[in-house]
Image (cartoon, grey):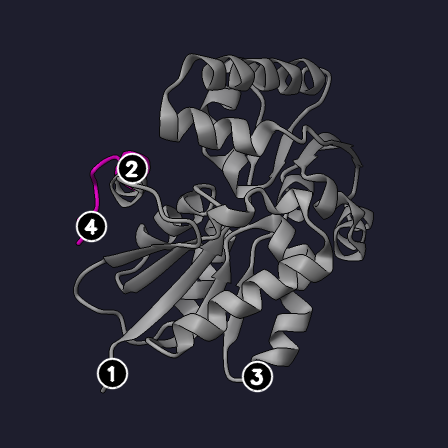
Amino acid sequence: MKKEYILFIDSGVGGLSTLAETMGLMQANFIYFADNLHSPYGDHTKADIFKYLSKIIKGLLKKFNIKIVVLACNTATTSSIENLRTYFKDIHFIGTEPAIKLASDSGAKNALCLATPTTLEQVRFNKLKSMANGTVRTLSVPSLAMSIENNLLYKKLNFRLQFLKDFHLVCSSAASHDGVILGCTHYSLIKHDLYKTLCLPIFDGNFGVAKQIAKLQKNNSGCNEVRFYFSRKEMGLTQKYRKILSQILANKINVC
């Protein structure tokens, strides 16, 4: 039988937070595709994002046995998951969405949701927001996802300064709230930094996504194999992604 893979797609490093959460629950063969040519997705239209995602999936299906595709990106999920399910009928799609329900169920009455402009514009997001028990205010910092990505990948002073500027803006905006909802998987990469600075509950949807994957994937392999692919090639990028993933996992799980 041909080896089966679970495909994770994001525009960059953010989905590594979702992949790491999944690897904490199960062992399987994973493909991680970073569409870095079009990063960040929050800057693109709904139609364009669907076009990028469908092209990626079609290409990988020619090479790999894939039954589960994880949209490890809130923007990709809110803009495209329904159309992708219609187009690829034999694949299970699992999306990543702002954990508004989790925050509401946890007692947050005045939460701040950080999300990209594209996510905030979607009907799907507004439905989630309308189901909250308390107030959910929103904040979009358009440069935040890329400042997190660039700071992690390239370690340059200008990227560090931009990240610190964005981080300060988020913290100053969140200070008057009783919880912060992360509406982008990139933001989950700074979850602990936000918690240490704000001393507020921080909510993301990664654990819920991981549980859904574990329920669907019946045949776990004996090793967490991870293959990395990119839409724009760059020297040493795979090694950088592996290093970030290992840091998230805190070296607790063996990555093949």
What label sits on residue 2 in the rendered view? 1
Rendered location of residue 138, percent (x, y) = 76, 33
Residue on which disc 2 sits: 240
Q: Residue at horizontal 23%, vertical 58%?
A: 224
Density class for disc 2 (Cα within 10 Å; few <14, some 14-19, many ≥20) is some
C-alpha span from label 2 to label 3: 34 Å
C-alpha span from label 2 to label 4: 14 Å
Indicate the amino acid at tag 4.
Val
Indicate the amino acid at tag 3.
Lys
Density class for disc 1 (Cα within 10 Å; few <14, some 14-19, many ≥20) is few
Image position of 56 with respect to 173: above or below: below
Indicate the amino acid at tag 1.
Lys
SS of the residue under disc 1: loop
Which segment did they paint magenta? Answer: 243-256
Between disc 2 and disc 4, the foreground one is 2
What label sits on residue 147 in the rendered view? none
Image position of 95 with respect to 107: above or below: below
Rendered location of residue 121, percent (x, y) = 79, 47
Which mark sits nearer the N-terminus, 1 or 4? 1
Residue on which disc 4 sits: 255
Indicate the amino acid at tag 2.
Lys
Which mark sits nearer the N-terminus, 2 or 4? 2
SS of the residue under disc 4: loop
What label sits on residue 89 in the rendered view? 3
C-alpha span from label 4 to label 3: 31 Å
Residue contact between numbered discs 1 and 2, judged by CB atoms under 8 Å: no
